[in-house]
Amino acid sequence: MSGNESDTIEARLGEQEYYRPPPAFVGQANVSDPAVYERFEDFPEGFEEYARLLDWDEHWETVFDGSDPPFYEWFGGGRLNASYNCVDRHLDSYGDKTALLWEGEPGGTRRIAYQDLYRMVNEFAAVLRDVGVTKDDIVTLHLPMVPELPVAMLACSRIGAPHSEVFAGFTAPALADRLADADSRYLVTIDGYYRRGEFLDHKRKADAALEDDTVDIDTVLVFTREDELHPDTDLEDGRDVLVADRLADHHGERIDPVSRAANDILFLMYTSGTTGKPKGAQHGTGGYLSYVAGTAKYLFDIHPTDTYWCFADIGWITGHSYIVYGPLAVGATSVMFEGAPDHPHRGRVWEIAERYDVDIFHTSPTAVRMFMKWGEKHLQPYDFDFKHLTTVGEPIQPEVWRWYYEHVGKESAVIIDTWWQTETGGVVISNLPALADMKPGSVGQPMPGISPAILGGDGEEIEPGMGTAGYLVLSRPWPGMLQTLYEDDERYISEYWETFSETDSDDWHDWVYKAGDSAVLAADGYYRVLGRLDDVMNVAGHRLGSMELESAIVEVPQVAESAVAPRDHPEKGQVADAYVVLKEDAESSEEIREAVVNAVSEEIGKFARPENVEFVTVLPYTRSGKIMRRLLTEISNDRELSDTTTLEDPSVPEEIRQQVESH
């Protein structure tokens, strides 16, 4: 166990007021009995409650095996198939019910009933078998937000082949890295997709990736977005296979689902490491599927009659868990969306919500800040009525939360913020929506059965209500967690476990998972996540998280969003630079600049006030919707920009640098 007392982080932002969940929501909630927390405290047996939501080919013999920490096994002896649980078992009751509602960018829509999904999954599973895919082969998917993506995932799981979806926006080198690491011999892609009205040639990335010497691919299966192949798409003889041609050979074919051991791999999901190559988070079948089914029902409150829209990309873990596997396992109608939220107009999201009468809307604080920046006028023409709103991906500032509550939820929807990671598989900290008050800026209390803590740099637990932030850790295993990093057990231990664990112990109680985020625990038991430890800055001797400074800045009425970055200072060590995006109806001025500085002084303290306030038109967002603050740090310190390949728009950092230099 290692640590350092100087790693302690200060928490300065004041606690917020409570909001009661609406009585109408509480009355219909899937979970409204507080005894659920007591049931899950019976560890590990409490988690059987989630497992019983699934159909098993063979019942598990042991709920949890912790004999070889941190390589835990869940529901050992049990057998099941994920595709069967998400599709087949719903056919008798929900065969005609819509499983996927797909909204294409040019305006095309598709309603895919469970019986349609069953046919599509079976036929593509037959195609996979036809080209040589067998059980345990890892199939890499490089697909955008088209229905063929969940179909491919479920077809892979049907035949026992783990899938590895690489976000469609990633570059050819990023795809090559993930293909090579997974030793994948099969790639599934598409000729093109739409973005802001343009039909993009998508397959060119696959072609470029396969030129890498580290990649050894036998077969590339190519879906087509339209009836005809994209005019710029090339097919290589002997390697590339048009899926449409093979589907014609397997029309109506049925493939029996392969029964998988609970701890067989279901999929790999690569997440960027702070150093070195991407990390292949490996998720098993029984534990993961149980956990996302349980949280879909208990936390997102999905009923069979609900229409649920997770406004994320399936290329990230949020889409895997809460567009595909979780919602479909509980028989939901899940909405999918292709394209940009402001094309062809900025009311498109609310237009879709009205058209499909969406009940549950699940998005990121980044998106909420974007909607807030555009203004309420883009919501007003549409008649939507949400019962449940969610945020995911990074901390939400209290002022942004209140805007979401008032203008999107119309003060009648419950809001949950969530904290989890690619590695956790599903949400691990959040309020069950009918059982706890909402508190802006706080992610809430642990999910049933989850045991988090806040540790100082010395490894000692920081008690609730101390106002001191520290390392967010999880001290007890849970079914949704990753099994390891693919073929890299040593890195798995070093990245997540060795800091606060007794790594020579065979007792799982001595192993503590370090999340890499900083957080503070209030006296009321609510957690507030402050951001990645990488985003902590040392301002005049005070270690502060970016979330607190940014939350204070967003309190200024004209501010839509902000990001802070540390700038080296010869006397103070570091000072904060604030990068501020204003709402559409506001213009930069000295008065707003002073308001930003004063907001930080009043909320955090004068020592933390920004040295510079830079008004910019956009922030550097990754394709998963997170602010890449290291690039702002490089701009503040006049350094050369590091890798920008994961940005939504790689030109943004230079645009920001030019805006800063012109002031």
Image (cartoon, rainbow, N blue to C red):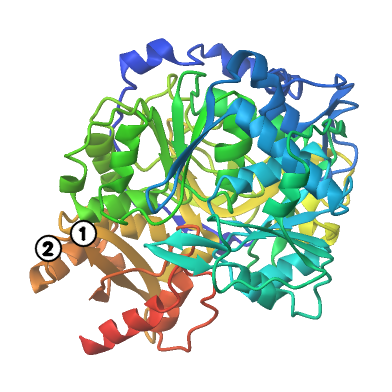
Closest to the observer, 536 or 653 = 653
Q: Position of residue 419 (x, y in %)?
A: 52, 43
Q: Residues within 10 Å of mark 1 (few under 14, many from 20)?
A: many
- Kindly identify the residue that appears in the image at 70 percent across and 71 percent down: 235
Q: Nearer the viewer, residue 470 or 269?
A: 269
Judge by depth and name the residue closer to the eye, 349 or 646. Answer: 349
From what the image shows, is residue 227 above or below residue 153? below
Q: Nearer the viewer, residue 2 or 378?
A: 378
Task: Note whether residue 450 is visible.
Answer: no
Question: Which residue, given by chain and number where applicable, does mark 2 sit on?
Answer: 586
Specify which label sits upstream in the sequence, 1 or 2.
Answer: 1
Q: Circle 2 — which element? A: loop
**Local SS, label 1:** strand
> Distance from label 1 to label 2 (Cα)?
8 Å
For the residues bearing labels 1 and 2, Cβ distance under 8 angstroms: yes
Report the quarter where the C terminus lies: bottom left
Quarter of the image where one finds residue 539? bottom left
Does residue 307 lie above or below 225 as drawn?
above
Query: Looking at the picture, which amino acid does disc 2 mark?
Result: Ala
Disc 1: which residue: 559
Q: Residue at x 19, y 51 (%)?
A: 375
Q: Residue at x 88, y 20 (%)?
A: 58
On screen, residue 238 above or below 302: below
Asked whether residue 110 appears in the rendered view, the answer is yes
Counting from the top left corner in percent of width and height, residue 306 is at 45, 23
Q: Which mark is residue 148?
A: none
Q: Is residue 644 left or right of residue 69?
A: left
* Position in image of residue 176 (x %, y %): 71, 72
Amino acid carrying label 1: it is Val
